[in-house]
Amino acid sequence: MLTARRQQRTIARDTCVRGIGFLTGVDVALRFLPAGADAGITFVRTDLPDRPRVAAQVGNVVPRQRRTTLQAGPATVEMVEHVMAALSGLNIDNCSVEIDAGETPGCDGSSQAFVSALTEAGFVEQDRPRDSLTIDRPITVRDGEATLTAHPGDAGRLVLSYNLDYARHPAIGRQSLFLEVAPDTFERELAPSRTFLLEAEALALRQAGMGARTTEADLLIFGANGPIGNQLRFPDECVRHKILDLVGDLALFPLDLTGHVVAHRSGHQLNAALVRKLVQTAERQRNARPVSRDGAPLDVDSIMKILPHRYPFLLIDRVLELDPGRHVLALKNVSCNEPFFPGHWPGRPIMPGVLIVEAIAQAAGVMIAEWVNPDERVALIVAIDDVKIRRPVVPGDQLHLEVQGVRTKNRTADVQGVARVGDQIAAEAKIRFILVEADTAA
C-alpha cells in the first residue's frame, strides 16, 4: 500500500567531507548540496568532463564484491552505501552529492563523518509529501544460505533485524540485532559502526592493490583475538555495521518503507535484489486500480458476478489487487471443510496440485474478464506449461494467487501465475487462454 507519511526534506546549506578512498588510496572531497523536492539523491563526478550525474537508483547498481557501486554511462561511484545510509538515516530525501574521485571517502569505515556534516548543515522541510510503501505480504530474496525478507510490520515503522554468522571466527562469532530505524536511533546506534574485515581478507585486498593507504586504525580488521590495532565501539559492532549497510542499500528504493526486514547473512548484492522487488511492488500498486468503487477488495459475491464457477469449484475468496489484463492478486483460504480433502487423502489432507493451478487460472480469469467484456467473450484454457508444485497446501493455509499478464492479443492471453503460502512458493505455472465468443463457450 502506498501512502504519504511525512514531508520531503533536504539540507539547509552546503557541507563537505574529506578523506582517503579505501580502494584507490586517493584524496577525496565530497560535498553535499541542497536539492529541490522530488530530485532524489544524485552523485556528480566533478573530476570528469561535463560533470556526469549518477542517480542513486537500484537500476544503476553494478556488481562489485563487498560494496555498492553505481554507474551511469562512463561515470562510476564506488562504495556509496555509507553515504546513502547517512542520508536515509537522517530522512534526507533530496540532495546533490558532488565528488572529485571515483569513490567516496572511507573516513573511519562508518557513516559518522557524513552524519556529523549533514547535521551541522541543518535540515529544511519541503512542500512535497514523501511516499511510503507499506509491506502487506512477505517479499523474499535468497542466495544460497543467505536470505532477506521484507515482512509486514507495525504502522509507520521500519524495523531491521540481522543475523550475523561468523561461527568459524570466534573473535566475531554469531551476532543478532533488532532495531527500529529512525533519525535518532540511526545516529546513536548505527552511524558509528565501522566496516570490518578478517585479517586474511585485508591481506588479499592489499595483494590485489587495494587499500594502500588504509591502516588498522581506519576500520576493524579482525585477527584471532579480536580487532588488530583498534577497539570496538559496541560489543556487537559487526552486526550493527551490517544493518548500517542495509540502510544504505535500502536507500536506493525511492520511497520510505514500512515493515520489518529480516536479514540472514545478507550482503550488498542480495540487498539490491530486494530493492528491485520492492520497486516492482510499488509500480504494481501504482498501476493497480481500486478493485471496487469504495476501494475495498472484491468479495465472493462480486467474484461470482465475474466468474461462472460455483461451489464446489470456485477456488478464490477475495481479490486484493487488480490491474486489468496486467496483474491480479487474489486469496484462497484453505479450510478443513474443502470437499476434496476426504479423498485426498484420508488421514493426511493435501490440496491437489491441479486445483492449486486451477485457482491460479481463476484469478487470471478475473484479470482477463476485467480487460474484455465478459458478456461478449470468455477465456478458455488451451495450454498449461512449466507447472511446478513446490510445497504441500494443507488445511489452515492461505494461498496468495498472483498472476501477471505476459502477452495479450485480440484472441489469446498468456499469463504467468504463482501461488504462495507466506513467502514460500506452493505452485507456479504458465497458462494460455483463448478468448471465444460467449455464446460459443456456452
Image: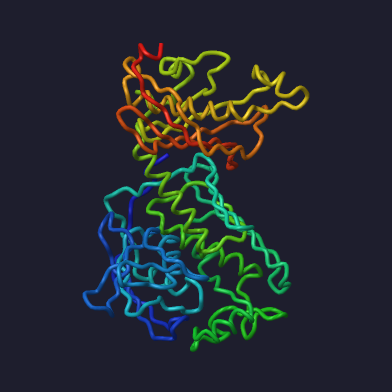
State the residue at coordinates (50%, 50%).
Answer: 158
- x and y percentages locating residue 125 in the rendered image: 31, 56
- x and y percentages locating residue 245 in the rendered image: 51, 65
Whether 379 is drawn above or below 271: the answer is: above
Q: Tell me if residue 161 can be seen.
A: no
Q: Tell me if residue 51 can be seen.
A: yes
**Quadrant of res 3:** top left
For the image shown, how many numbered marks are present on the structure?
Answer: 0
- x and y percentages locating residue 210 in the rendered image: 49, 84
Q: Is residue 385 left or right of residue 441?
A: right
State the residue at coordinates (55%, 48%).
Answer: 140
Whether 279 is drawn above or below 270: the answer is: above
Name the residue nearer the viewer: 176 or 252.
Answer: 252
- x and y percentages locating residue 409 in the rendered image: 31, 32
Q: Is residue 3 left or right of residue 233?
A: left
Whether 205 is drawn above or below 422: the answer is: below
**Quadrant of res 179:** bottom right
Q: Is residue 229 left or right of residue 209?
A: right
Direction bottom: furthest residue? 213
Name the residue nearer the viewer: 50 or 3.
Answer: 50
Direction left: furthest residue? 50
State the residue at coordinates (49%, 16%).
Answer: 309
Instruction: Locate the N terminus by quadrant.
Output: top left
Q: Is residue 55 left or right of residue 380?
A: left
Whether 402 is drawn above or below 59: the answer is: above
Name the residue nearer the viewer: 363 or 91.
Answer: 363
- Colour treatment of the image: rainbow
Instruction: Locate the C terminus by quadrant.
Output: top left
